[in-house]
Amino acid sequence: MAKDDVQTKVTADGLRYRSKASGSPFGTGGVFSAATMSCFKCGKHRPRAQLKTQRILGKSQVVCDPACGQTG
């Protein structure tokens, strides 16, 4: 299997990629209530409203609420 050689150049303004979409895949970071966090147990990103804190190994961690796998 040979990889395609991708030729990129650094432009005058310092950017290399023109086709990459800007922004985060997790939404806007400006509104705290719209932010997502990952569950400590399953690792899925969920809105903060769907998470709860639970003491695991002596520290408070965020986990899915009610339980991992039961939320859509």
Image (spheres, helix red, strand yellow):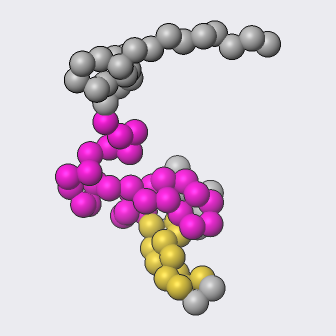
Q: Position of residue 69 (x, y in %)?
A: 62, 57
Quarter of the picture holding the N terminus: top right
Magenta region includes residue 65: no
Nearer to me, 45 or 68: 45
> Horizontal and vertical percent for residue 44?
55, 54
**Residue for point 37% across, 63% down:** 48
Residue at left 24%, top 60%? 32
Q: 18 or 50: nearer the eye?
A: 18
Does residue 12 appear to the left or right of 52 in the view shown?
Answer: left
Residue 51 visible (yes or no): yes
Q: What stretch is highlighted in magenta?
A: 23-50
Q: Is residue 34 above or below residue 26?
A: below
| 33 displayed left or right of 50 | left
Q: Position of residue 62 (x, y in %)?
A: 48, 72
Q: In this rendering, does residue 66 appear at all?
A: no
Of the pair 26 and 71, the residue shown nearer to us: 26
**Where does the image place residue 65, in percent across and percent down from the top left?**
50, 68
The reply, left or right, for residue 66 in relation to residue 30 is right
| Residue pictured at 20% horizontal, 52% vertical | 30
- Left or right: where 64 falls relative to 4: left
Task: Check residue 49 for magenta coloring.
Answer: yes
Above/below status of 35 relative to 15: below
